[in-house]
Amino acid sequence: MPRIRSATNPTELPAPSTLCKAFDRLDIAVWRVLLGLSVSLLPTNGVAGIDASGFDRSHASKHYTKRAKLTIQQLKVTLLVNSKVNAVLDLHVTTTQKHDRQIAPSLIKRTPEHIDILLGDKGYEDQKIRQFARHHEIRPLIKHREFTSLPKAWNARLDADL
């Protein structure tokens, strides 16, 4: 991290475990405040995208999982990212099998001031998410699942708007 080193000018770097232990002592609320402050320094454009990805943890060593008393096999990380500067506006990490439509409202609710337009794939296609976004004066641009001709027309209209 050359920019951080030049700003702090440390005489020696701490061991990586020192930083991990320091980070573990901070509450998630502190991390959210720091994330919000860092985003406020960037020239965002109000267009945010939401998506999730799963990470398999089955490749951790048996010794590590036993020592750490872990039984988690998979993590799901959902990010809300500004499209102009790729800044992470908010994130959600879970070890449960929550669907995208269950996670999205909490991310939207925590950062409505940074979002004017919400982009998402069909995993976020839920009328409750659309209504929730509109309630917070956010325009949802999320494709509909095409089971009939009406959603196909809605998607064509979305493509024209984009």
Image (cartoon, helix red, strand yellow):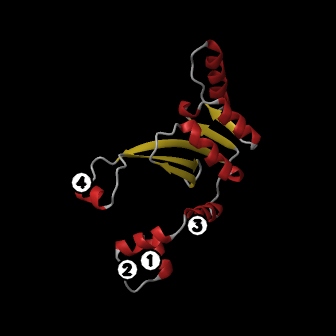
Mark 4 neighbour class, 10 Å CA radius: few under 14, some 14 to 19, many 20 or more: few
Q: Mark on residue 158?
A: none
Q: Earlier in the sequence, mark 2 or mark 4?
A: 2
User: How far apart in space, not on screen, are marks 3 and 1 (Cα)?
Assistant: 22 Å
Residue at x 57% of width, y 23% of height: 145
Label 2 to label 3: alpha-carbon separation: 24 Å
Q: In the structure shown, which secondary structural element does the residue marked by tag 1 occupy?
A: helix
Going from N to C along the chain, the mark reached first, 1 or 2, is: 1
- The disc, 2 or 3, on the residue closer to the chain's N-terminal end is 2
Tags 1 and 2 in contact by the CB under 8 Å rule?
Answer: yes
Image depth: mark 2 or mark 4 in front: 4
Q: Is residue 6 toward the left or the right of residue 131 in the image?
A: left
Picture residue at 45% right of the left edge, 73% below the top: 22
Looking at the image, tell me whether mark 4 or mark 3 is earlier in sequence order: 3
Disc 2 and disc 4 in contact, CB within 8 angstroms: no
Can you give x and y, in whole percent of width and height, for residue 162 in the image? 64, 33
Q: Amino acid at mark 3?
A: Val
Depth check, front residue: 83 or 26: 26
- x, y (%) of residue 61? 24, 54
Label of residue 30 in the image:
3
Q: Is residue 45 above or below residue 64?
A: above
Amino acid type of the residue that numbered disc 1 sits on in the rendered structure:
Arg
Q: Which residue is mark 2?
A: 13
Circle 1 sits on which residue? 5
Q: Residues within 10 Å of mark 2 (few under 14, many from 20)?
A: few
CA gap between label 4 and label 1 equals 36 Å
Q: CA distance from mark 4 to mark 3?
A: 32 Å
Is 39 located above or below residue 106 in the figure? below
